[in-house]
Structure formats: structure tokens, C-alpha cells
Amino acid sequence: MRDADVPTAEFRGFDHPDPARTFIETREYPVVVKADGLAAGKGVIVCKTKQEALAAVERIMVKEEFGRTAGRQVVIEKRLDGEELSVLALVAGRTIIPLAPTQDHKRAFDNDEGPNTGGMGAYCPAPLGTPAILNEIEAHALVPTVHALKRKRTPFRGVLYAGVMVTNQGPRILEYNCRFGDPELQPVLMRLKTDLFELLLATAEDRLSEFEDKLEWDPRSAVCVVMASAGYPGNYPKGKLITGLEDAAQLPNVKVFHAGTKLDGGHVMTDGGRVLGVTALGETLAEAKKNAYDAVAKINFAGAHYRRDIADKALKGMTKHE
Ligand code: GLY
């Protein structure tokens, strides 16, 4: 991001805990500590105090809670205030096609409380992603990033997923992933009418320009509620019987995406932290939310945990940047 001059938080990388601790001690602002490696979406620790930040360095680098590789380096950055937005874009050559904007819900519990997770629910389109904000993200983040990668002779083709914080000063990029977002993609796919296979094939074959301004969307809203195992994102049990999937499948405009499940003797069992992405369309965001939770109510497994406030930020008009 620095190379491409993309607006992001002030940050520094460390490969030893001592200078990381000194950096934290000398900051005048709250920080976020990130394990510099794959950590199943859990390697970002948003800290309120210096003590929390020091503990995060301990967990990542000393105790290596997120694994050896992810524990070798940390990135410590200034904590930004605002609302998060996920923008997933398809990229091939010069063509960049952002998909409809979504909002994830990273914390485990309602009202954005509890630890960070891989994502507990999402909705699409996110009103926070106004055309003006999306244009800014494209012009100041996606375009310069794609150009910088090309200049480095590592041209990018695939999904560029920008994790954005929409601050009072404008959008800031928190992170990039080169994959789709989970659960963000579920509500996106409920609405995307263009053939996903053709779209991905065109991306892979560098023909994405054929789809420029041609994506077709269902105008309705979609909401995805993640049903997780008890204890997630910490330790959780597996092998719990899931019931009610057939009942949920009977509901119109509902699709249940399987994540941490497995088939065992004809029964569907839990087999991961995030188990199901229960997703529904509705004429309005409120109706999509209701439809998704009606489907969730049909499904059961021991210890099932889910947030009850997915999409509420938009519904309660808490979106500050419309
Ligand atoms: N939901 C966040 C992610 O896919 O990284």
C-alpha cells in the first residue's frame, strides 16, 4: 500500500517482540496488532489499551498462538475509527470490476462485542458504499494497487478484496485479500445474476473487459447470518448433528451455504467453527434480515451460536457516511 500510495493507517512491521513493545509503549494512540500471516481470519487484534496491545504481541510472537509462520512478524498500525466495508473486485489486465458493496460483522457477539472472527454475517448492498465512496475506493485504492503490481512485474489477475474503514476523512484500506470474502460473498452471490462461472473464466483468461458495465444484479437485498459452533472463535466441539436443513430449504429466497459441515452416514454434522451461512433475499434489507432469521430458526445443532443483529447498523440508520 505504501508503494502504491494507497490511503491506509500509519503502520510498522516488526520481526522481534522487543522493538514491537517499545513502539507500542511510545504511541499516543490505540493500535491494532496483526499477525503477518494466515491465521484463519483471527490474527487481527484490535486493542483499546497499551496493555492489550502488549498482550497481543505476546500471543502472536511469543506464544505463537496463530502458528509459527504467522507469529514471525507483526504489523502494528494506528487504530482507525469508522465503519467497515468490504469491496470485492474482479481484476484482469487493466479491467477492474468491483462487485456490489457488502458489510461484514467481524466480532463474535451482538453490538460488535467479543473477539474478532472470520465474520459472523454480512449484507449486500451496504448503503455505506455510496457511489461516491465506491468511486473513491476504486480511484485511490484499487487502480493504484493494480498498477503498482503491474509495475513490479507481478500483474494481478483474480479477486482483489479490499477491507475498508470508512472514516470521517474518507475511506482507508485496512487490508487486501486475494480471494473472496466469507461471509461477504454469500449475499453477493444471492444477488449476482450474471453467470459466476463465465465471469471467473473471463477473469482467468484475461477477457474480463467483456463484462465491463454488464454485470446483472437482483435489485433486492440479501442478508447472511453465520451459525457457528459453541466457543468459536476459540476452541469448539465438532460432530454435532444438524437438523432442520430441509425445512429451511423449503423457504423461498433462502439458501444455506455449508462451511464447517460434513456428511456422516447420511447425517449432516458440524465440522468447523463457522458451520453454515444462512442467506436470504428480501424486497428490503429489513425483509431480507427477517427471511434469513426465519431460516435460522428452523435449523438446530447443540451449542449453535449466531448474532441477532446482522444488518442492524444499516437498518437503524447508524450508517454515518451516506
Ligand atoms: N469476512 C472476512 C474475510 O473473508 O476475510
Image: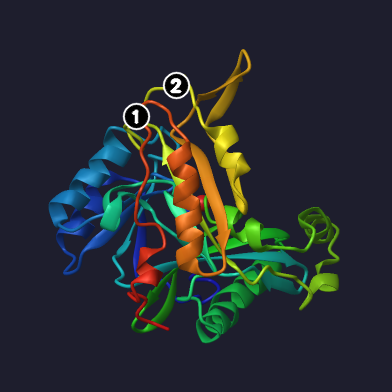
Residue 29 percent coordinates (x, y): 19, 68
Residue 82 percent coordinates (x, y): 33, 73
Q: For the point 77% across and 63% down, which residue is it?
A: 194
Q: Residue furthest bottom?
A: 132
User: Where residue 23 is drawn, which disc sits there?
Assistant: none
Secondary structure under tag 1 reads: loop
Q: Label 2: which residue?
A: 240
The answer to whether residue 37 is seen in the rendering is no
Is label 1 within 8 A of ligand 1 (CB to nearest ligand atom)? Answer: no
Q: Nearer the viewer, residue 317 or 38?
A: 317
- Which badge, 1 or 2, comes first in the chain's sequence? 2
Secondary structure under tag 2 reads: loop
Side (left or right) of 121 relative to 180: left
Q: For the point 38% across and 33% down, which residue is it?
A: 304
User: Where residue 303 is drawn, which disc sits there?
Assistant: 1
Q: Residue furthest top?
A: 265
Q: Are marks 1 and 2 in contact (CB under 8 Å)?
A: yes
- The amino acid at mark 1 is Gly
Side (left or right) of 222 relative to 217: left
Up the image or down, 71 lies above or below 83; here it is above
Up the image or down, 278 lies above or below 193; here it is above
- The amino acid at mark 2 is Lys
The answer to whether residue 30 is seen in the rendering is yes
Residue 37 percent coordinates (x, y): 46, 44
Q: Nearer the viewer, residue 224 or 237?
A: 224
Q: Check disc 2: other Cα within 10 Å, few if <14, some if 14-19, many if 20+.
A: some
Q: Nearer the viewer, residue 217 or 90?
A: 217
Q: Nearer the viewer, residue 176 or 4?
A: 176
| Disc 1/disc 2 C-alpha distance (Å) | 9 Å
Side (left or right) of 123 relative to 33: right
Q: Quadrant of the C terminus?
A: bottom left
